[in-house]
Image: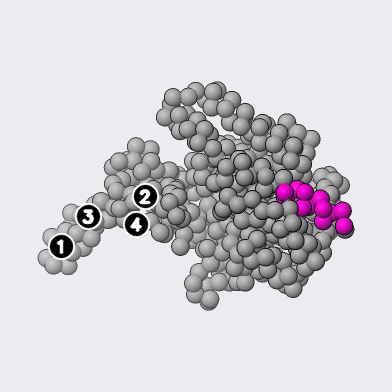
Amino acid sequence: ASRARSCRIQSSPDVADEPRLGEDLKSWLAFADQKVGEVATLATGLAEGRAAVADRLAESTAAVRSRAAAPGVVVPEVRERTAALTPADGERAPYAERAAAQQARLNLPPLPTTTIGSFPQTSEIRSTRAAWVRGELSDADYTAAMRAEIASTVALQEELGLDVLVHGEPERNDMVQYFAEQLDGFATTVNGWVQSYGSRCVRPPILWGDVSRPAPLTVEWTAYAASLTDKPVKGMLTGPVTILAWSFVRDDLPLGDTADQVALALRDEVTDLEAAGIGVVQVDEPALRELLPLRRAAHPGYLDWSVRSFRLSTAGADTATQVHTHLCYSEFGQVIGAIDGLDADVTSVEAARSRMEIVPELADAGYGRGIGPGVYDIHSPRVPSVDEVTDLVELAAKSIDPRLVWVNPDCGLKTRAYAETKESLANLVTAARTVRATL
Ligand code: GLN
Ligand code: ZN
């Protein structure tokens, strides 16, 4: 189930307790207390007739009308831009041309090593962010603290000998909320907690209007990381499908249209990252599979808009910019064609628990671009041995052209601690070098 849809009614009690939401927006929303009120209205109406609830029905109709006409709900510039899109906006140069240009720029060894983006979110990082949000830490002090964190993450990756580095995402509370907080068209709540898995909770953003990007979202942190190293640093974005899957979406515009709006905002971000000198950009779509409709008949329609919006967000990239994506589940059967359709230069996927099963499946389906099957499961603190990782890398390199294989963990490291992260990544690098030497 998606994060937003698994929301139980008691999770978000009363819209009146949401200080960040404007009065207009509040009048359009129903949290738990409002929903209970609506049920009571319906019950009264059924028992006593429409007249008994006429006031409340009129109030509801007025709210719907005010929403349709409110500024920000329909933004003409946003609508004009999506209306002008053509299939060419989702096309990049042929893969062979891209791969050559990227290799000339990045000069990576065979079996390049990388991570999925986040590094451990220590309690220190969390409390620094919380203090800043409460206004107890100045912007300057917050920025300095995050920069120090980024600098130590970059230094660690250099020491470990990873090939494509990341900034580590310390500034992100959540991979969707972080983007929604900065995009026009989204609102975020203070109390709207929803269980995502196990004991982990998130606050899904509320999408209420047309989406645009008032300012760059990630460029400063990424460019700072890149300024600290000669190795390539991978910019890290959350894809349009995942942003929508983990938000409360609007009911007055098809999801595919909204996805195009989000995609264009991300496309502009990719351009800005490139202008800041970033040569590798990852657009995460861990929710691509999750949003797949249950009914088979609905699959082609869904895959059409989801793949289109991903391509739209990435196809503005230069031929020499390497586009990565990350998908985060292990049953790929129904989306294997879509993975190819995304046209990313490199796709990292969860694979350790299934012992690289996805790699021959992709090879059989004719997939011929970079693939990073995860070599260890990040859900556990267990450190994989060098031999274990070496076996998996060898297995992958036997099932598909070894020139396509990347070596990376299954997913982001934010829930892990540094002790096991360092050991695991050290073993990963050793394993990659061992197999590299045999190629
Ligand atoms: N870049 C994100 C991270 O590393 C990806 C998370 C995910 O796949 N869910 O945390
Ligand atoms: Zn993942």
Q: Which residues are magenta?
A: 427-438
Q: Tell which circle, 1 or 3, labels the residue nearer the N-terminal end.
A: 3
Q: CA distance from mark 1 to mark 4?
A: 24 Å
- Give me the residue at 65% from left, 62% from top: 351
Q: Tell which circle, 1 or 2, labels the residue nearer the N-terminal end.
A: 1
Q: Residues within 10 Å of mark 2 (few under 14, many from 20)?
A: some
Q: CA distance from mark 2 to mark 3?
A: 20 Å
Q: Main secondary structure of the magenta part?
A: helix
Horizontal side of residue 334 vs 40, given as left or right: right
| Residue 386 seen by the camera | yes
Q: CA distance from mark 3 to mark 4?
A: 16 Å
Reading the image, the residue beneath label 4 is 8
Reading the image, the residue beneath label 3 is 37
Indicate how the structure is coloured in the image: one colour
Q: Secondary structure at mark 3?
A: helix
From the viewer's perspective, is the residue at label 1 or at label 4 nearer? Answer: 4
Please name the amino acid that badge 3 sits on.
Gly
Reading the image, the residue beneath label 2 is 67
Q: Nearer the viewer, residue 54 or 403?
A: 403
Q: Secondary structure at mark 2?
A: helix
